[in-house]
Image (tube, rainbow, N blue to C red):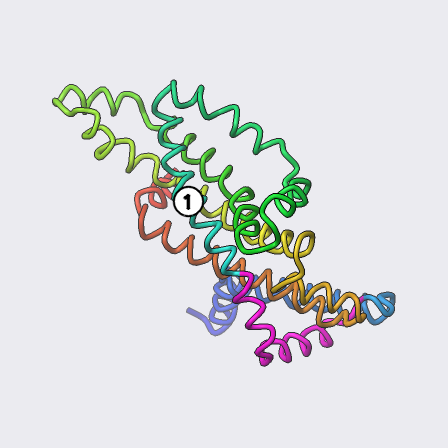
Amino acid sequence: MSSAEGPALNIDRLLDSRWFLRALAFAAFALVWQVYATAAGGFFVPTFTETAAAIGRQLASPEVWQAFATSNIAMVLGFGLAVVIGIPLGFLMGRFRLAERAINPYLNILLVTPLAGIIPLLMMSLGIGLASRVIVVWSFAIVMVVVNTRAGVRQVDRSLIDMVRLFGAGELGVWRRVILPGSLPAVLAGVRVALGRAVTGMVIVELVMVSVGIGGLILRYQAFFRFAELYGMVVLIILEALILLAIVDWVQRKATPWASMTSIRD
């Protein structure tokens, strides 16, 4: 290999690196943010450097960590209930027509209901404590779990079920050998989407219903025109959501390696 080919090969490898491309995209985003905020942002849009400095102060603040802990209690409980309840419901709806007919109307109600609009009703009926916040998060998340689980069961190849039955498997054997492995990728995909919606519900309920945790800090920053901290809090929420989604992605790859191999081969 000639001396000229060496640098060209290194550049090609660098351009093929997803981390390099992500860093390049982030640098471009930060530059555009900095230029826009400096030139036309005015008082209400802090620069990228001001926001980064605010994030550094927030990460060192016990108050911010306490706010995240308070908010995440409701998020974890609501999301956990959505998974524990939603996955069995999705399996039942996907496998049994009677369960589909019984549950589907209520699922459609949750799909079309503007969830932010029911928050005042929950506040009047359950108060402004932890229970109402958990129910709001649960309402945001459960639909995605049920819908994706049901779709995962329905997309299982019917011929595989018939083949297992020919070898003498009963309903339990069909579930263990065909339905559960075949639907698991879709189930975990639903859990991933539901987790993002749970984070959204966690923030919305604290902005609309009760000013505690993250929502309380956001409203305080807004009231006192601390826009760098306000933007910084939004960035921290996004970072938390991305970390949680990355964990779910890792679990999905480990739990369903055949799905990744199939997608690559296809």
Taking the spot 55% from the left edge, 27% from the top edge, the residue there is 108
Q: Is residue 130 magenta?
A: no
Image x and y of residue 230, in percent: 72, 67
Q: Amino acid at mark 1?
A: Val
Image x and y of residue 245, in percent: 48, 55
Name the residue nearer the viewer: 4 or 184: 184
Please identify the quadrant where the C terminus is shown: top left
Image x and y of residue 9, in percent: 48, 66
Q: Element under label 1?
A: helix
Query: Would you place residue 152 above or below residue 220 in this image?
Result: above
In the picture as drawn, the residue positioned furthest to the left comes out as: 168
> Circle 1 is placed at which residue position?
83
Residues rendered magenta in the picture: 45-71
Q: Is residue 60 magenta?
A: yes
Taking the spot 56% from the left edge, 63% from the top edge, the residue there is 239
Image x and y of residue 151, in percent: 43, 30
Taking the image as shown, residue 166 lies to the left or right of residue 14, namely left
